[in-house]
Image (cartoon, rainbow, N blue to C red):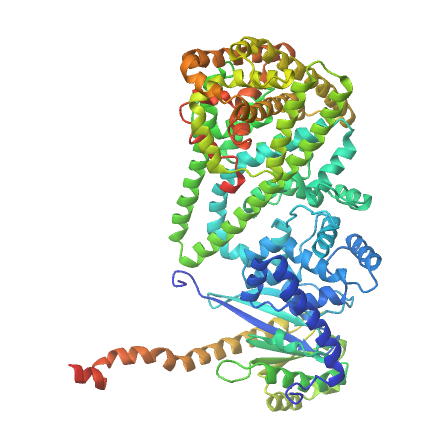
Amino acid sequence: MLTSIPFARPQDAGPSVAIVTKVNRIQDQLVKKHDVELHMHVNRLEIAPQIYGIRWVRLLFGREFPLQDLLVVWDALFADSITLDLVDYIFVAMLLYIRDALIASNFQTCLGLLMHYPPLGDINALLQKALFLRDPKNNPRPANYQFQQNLDYYKTRGADLMNKTRSSTKTAPLNINKVSSSLLSFGRKLIAPAIMGGSGGVSPINSEVHSSSSSSSTSPASAPAPALSHPLAEPPSARAPSQTQSHAQNQHYRLLKSESMPVQLSKDAGSVGASRVSLPTPTHTDTQGQSSRTVSSSPSIESLSGGRAQSTASPPLPPSRGSDVSTSSPPLSATKKDSFFNITRSRSHSKTMGKKESEDDLEAQVSFLQGQINDLEAMSKFCAKMMNTHICKIQEVILQENLEKEDEVLVSLAGLKQIKDILKGALRFNQSQLEAEENEEITIADDHYTSIAAAEKARAAINHQGDHQQKESSRPSRDSDLDGSLSTEEQEQEQEQEQVQEQVQEQEQVQEQEQATTPAEQQVTSFHGSEFKNWDDYILVSQDGDLQAPEGGGAGGEKASAEQTPPIRRGRGLVRLEPEGEAGTFHDPLMAAITSGSSSPDEGSTNSKDSDFTIVNPNDL
Amino acid sequence: MQNNHHKEHLYKILVIGDLGVGKTSIIKRYVHHNFSPNYRATIGVDFALKVLNWDQETVRLQLWDIAGQERFGNMTRVYYREAMGAFIVFDVTRPASLEAVAKWKEDLDSKLTLANGKNVATVLLANKCDQGRDVLTNNGIKMEQFCQENGFVGWYETSAKENINIDEAANCLVKHIIASEKDLLQSEVPDTITPQLENDKGGTCSSCFRSQ
């Protein structure tokens, strides 16, 4: 043995074997334990851990992170234990951070990723991940924080993958972009108002946004200041992980052509509109036109209407709510279908370009879609977190105010919390269930408001067996009350936001739009939240309402629901003017889809509902 | 599958040699076209990619930059895997690094052979030639002899700093790699053809003949 290995001496074998043993143990045990798929992948590619791991371990990651981050890592390592056993878990956390990219990559790209570790957005997220991996019980679970393939990576990697997939991927992923561009922009805009809408001042919110989007954990145990100030100081890299990163991902293949994108990405949330302008896709130009036409439309409207403008020609009609629901949701699915057609088209197109290219193409698409999924996941996590903070805030205020209709607001808040849980993933959101429920709902939905009123009344009076007739009569006033109470809330929020706005002093018009419409959105959200909640109550409590609806209610119920909505909108209009109604109408399908579809009574009167609920669920991608 | 396009080759090339002889600098010069006077020890292994156009074909070189100190470990085998060629580098200002060349070559040949059992093409690089010609390399005949004795396909005086002979050395290595690859493919030919021959001669199989 020794003769065949001229340089190896017995005394040399000791330490080298030790480190090889260590990295092998990390890869074969820890990585396998925490990510079988990744373990299988590196094994399949036969990437021995000592190829990349020796440097990682020998220098305690000294070459893998920039100095600022490295100091944080070393602080963590040395403070943790004299045995430095956190090294193993940082090792694993590093692998997990780039696992999607690794799994989607071939041998060479994997080596590139491993041996030139991509820049990290938030080193603390990595450390928390490492701590969590070592001791899940005593450490908070950090949300999935994933490296998104970006331009920097390809730059450093040379022409490798880019060259291979150049011709085919340039066209194909552009189409994929469309699949979720509306979703992503929806998410971005959800996020953007949240940033602006916080009452606690700008900087804490911003930092919160950053830490939550990067570490995304609901409890950032020790998210220290350095990491926050440092990433914020470097817009392109630091901004990337949050709302703009999805965009960056989206833009990735376009970036192969133009590198101007990161600059746009580095702009604040307010510049979403600006970056949108720069997008070459017709979707976005349409969106832009629409948003300028209806100045104060809700952010989500824009994304939806973008899809609509592209797929169907039906313009948004704010006044007629019932028809809006029906027109606004099908286009969503239409958009999606359209974009999937695009994918298939591009695939078949790429087939003509040779198997190899199409393979690369597919590979790139897989990695791309994976990235999209991650984005959406992160988005919903983030939304959940922001919702949670706002709900808590609202709840506090309400409790302090001792409002007359406190119960109703709290019920709404409970509904919102449920939505939050769904977003967070704590509550299971099942597509098929949703559709099933939806179908059943057709007959009974007309009676929905009655039931809401009933449920609320029942709750308020602690009288579950109340007379239906009575409830029905009490319904309109109740609804308007509900609306009124929420309006006050909304006014408060608006004021808060205006304060924030003054603090920020970035008074771009887009921002103003988004800000102005934020409360609307929130109100709608809470409104539907209450419906959602009450719908559940309704099912549980007054089941007989179902039977009553088709019999006695019938057309009357339908009329009732049709009549019901306009007053609400009018009520809002007094306070908030038009955007309100629009926000309500256009927001419906999305909210409905998110909150499992049982929420909107109006949809009972729409015909094409089955096709409506395919969009928002990220799993669908 | 590649018929529509020009052929692509991907070769893994090792760059080995003693500590501080300039392996990383050579790669940096070759791939990134620059030079840094600062020394930064390579730890373990690094790698870089170089794309060449070679007779209307694309050649991708995966350059594995193996740290000089790794010869003391027992890990080079992992790094050598599936390499098609190698540079062994020494420093003309340090005779000891030339002495180590033979050891590196031996290490390489003992752990890495082509499918046909031959050693991979290896080019010897006498780096830092800008530092003044050394007695070692002054005698070209002696160096030729050294190459023959140790199985190098060629040797070059190089300078990463002054960009001397690096492209030439790489071209030489690629040329030999392509030649040895053809060699390899030809040696595989009989094996791959065998079933076709059997198909042709299917009727001559004794059992078939009997059944007919």
Q: Nearer the viewer, residue A365 or A400?
A: A400
Q: Position of residue A18 (x, y in %)?
A: 73, 74
The percent position of residue A406, horizontal first and vertical second, equals 70, 18
Q: Is residue A161 visible?
A: yes
Q: Quadrant of residue A342?
A: top left
Name the residue furthest left. Answer: B212
Which part of the image, by quadrant, shows the N terminus of chain B? Answer: bottom left
Q: Which residue sits at x=60%, y=34%?
A: A187
Q: Residue at x 74, y 27 (%)?
A: A393
Instruction: Pick the residue in front: A295 or A73.
Output: A73
- At 52% from the left and 76% from the top, the residue drawn is B177
Taking depth in this image into account, of A598 and A493 the one nearest to the observer is A598
Residue A209 sits above or below residue A142 on the image: above
User: A501 or A2, which lies in front?
Assistant: A2
Q: Quick check: A619 left or right of B44? A: left
Q: Position of residue A274 (x, y in %)?
A: 62, 31
Q: Residue at x 57, y 16 (%)?
A: A453
Would residue A555 appear left or right of A181 to someone viewing this image? left
Q: Is residue A314 above or below residue B132?
A: above
Quarter-of-image position of residue A525: top right
- The x, y position of residue B120, in whole percent, is 55, 80
Could one spot residue B28 in this view of the protein? no
The image shows residue A324, relative to residue B79, as above or below, that is: above
User: Which of the image's four quarters has the C terminus of chain B?
Assistant: bottom left
